[in-house]
């Protein structure tokens, strides 16, 4: 879709089938609208977003990529489609100038390297919040930390990682804003261009049902209370403003708007809503 001077592409690196209680353990299964489940299971997308204005190309997250090989083998899952998807829209990995990591969970940085371990985006500067990078580089209690270090260390060694502190512009009109809670240094991406505003949320929210129910807490939120405060703040800021809301774990393409419907917030998927 067009976001002012930028074109926004939603890219599905892959997906995995999960029982809803695996993601939202405190939500009774019968509270899920039947249309949201497939044979009682959630299809969770591993989504990325690409922004390009013809001269600047910014990729937000890189999906699960080759790290999917570390998942338990009994999972119905697909991963590693990002390079193919970029080719379909005429973007070569060499063209990507900036990679933003909303955070460093493996499903957001797993595509940084090719299956043989070389950098997939050799010309890109990787922008990740300093708090986030420090957390994962020094964290030893989180089981995924070695995998994260494995995909970030070669890029650090190559001088490709530029940590950010606070709000930072990574391209004209493309700003990182702090949205902590899901992880300590989680950021979202706000694109402001030619009168349009787009909010790429990262893992502030994992499913559209959290828009009416922000208290549905994902098991992946490292600080659930802070994640809830951030989620409520973001939804409040975006609701009814015409801001495009994009989230990589939402059903693809994961792009829409947040509107009020009878005093309840809802997600309105799509790219064509006009708000006066
Ligand atoms: Zn995450
Ligand atoms: Zn995620």
Image: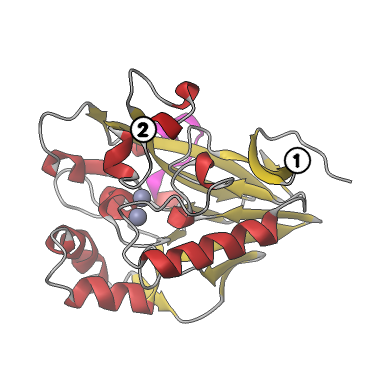
Q: Which numbered disc covers residue 212?
A: none
Quarter of the figure that contains the N terminus: top right
User: Which secondary structure dominates the residues rendered in magenta?
Assistant: helix
The residue indicated by pointer 1 is 262
Q: Is residue 186 above or below residue 94?
A: below
Mark 1 close to ligand 2, CB under 8 Å: no
Q: Residue at x 20, y 40 (%)?
A: 68
Which element is circle 1 on? loop
Q: Residue at x 25, y 55 (%)?
A: 119
Q: Residue 249 appears at what percent x and percent y?
A: 43, 42
- 10 Å neighbourhood of mark 2: few (<14), some, or many (≥20)? some
Q: Residue 79 appears at what percent x and percent y?
A: 27, 34
Q: How many marks?
A: 2
Asked where in the image residue 233 lies, by quadrant, the reply is bottom right
Q: Which numbered disc covers residue 29?
A: 2
**Closer to the camera in the image, 171 or 35:** 35
Q: Is residue 91 magenta?
A: yes
Q: Is residue 188 above or below residue 249?
A: below
Residues rendered magenta in the picture:
84-93
Q: Is residue 238 left or right of residue 209?
A: right
């Amino acid at each position: 879709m067009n976001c002012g001077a930028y074109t926004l592409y939603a890219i599905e690196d892959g997906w995995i089938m999960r029982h809803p209680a695996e993601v939202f353990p405190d939500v009774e299964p019968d509270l899920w609208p039947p249309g949201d489940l497939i044979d009682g299971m959630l299809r969770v997308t591993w989504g990325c977003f690409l922004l390009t204005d013809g001269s600047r190309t910014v990729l937000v997250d890189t999906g699960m990529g080759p790290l999917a090989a570390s998942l338990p083998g009994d999972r119905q899952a697909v991963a590693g489609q990002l390079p193919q998807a970029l080719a379909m829209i005429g973007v070569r990995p060499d063209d990507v100038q900036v990679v933003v990591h909303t955070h460093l969970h493996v499903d957001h940085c797993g595509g940084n390297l090719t299956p043989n371990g070389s950098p997939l985006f050799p010309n890109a500067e990787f922008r990740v919040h300093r708090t986030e990078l420090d957390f994962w580089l020094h964290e030893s209690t989180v089981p995924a930390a070695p995998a994260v270090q494995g995909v970030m260390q070669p890029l650090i060694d190559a001088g490709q990682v530029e940590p950010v502190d606070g709000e930072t512009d990574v391209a004209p009109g493309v700003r990182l804003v702090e949205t902590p809670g899901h992880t300590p240094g989680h950021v979202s991406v706000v694109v402001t261009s030619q009168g349009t505003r787009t909010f790429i949320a990262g893992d502030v929210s994992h499913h559209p049902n959290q828009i009416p129910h922000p208290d549905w807490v994902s098991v992946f939120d490292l600080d659930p209370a802070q994640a809830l405060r951030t989620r409520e703040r973001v939804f409040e800021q975006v609701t009814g403003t015409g801001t495009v809301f994009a989230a990589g774990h939402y059903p693809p393409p994961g792009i829409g708007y947040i509107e009020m419907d009878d005093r309840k917030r809802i997600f309105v998927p799509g790219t064509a809503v006009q708000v006066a």
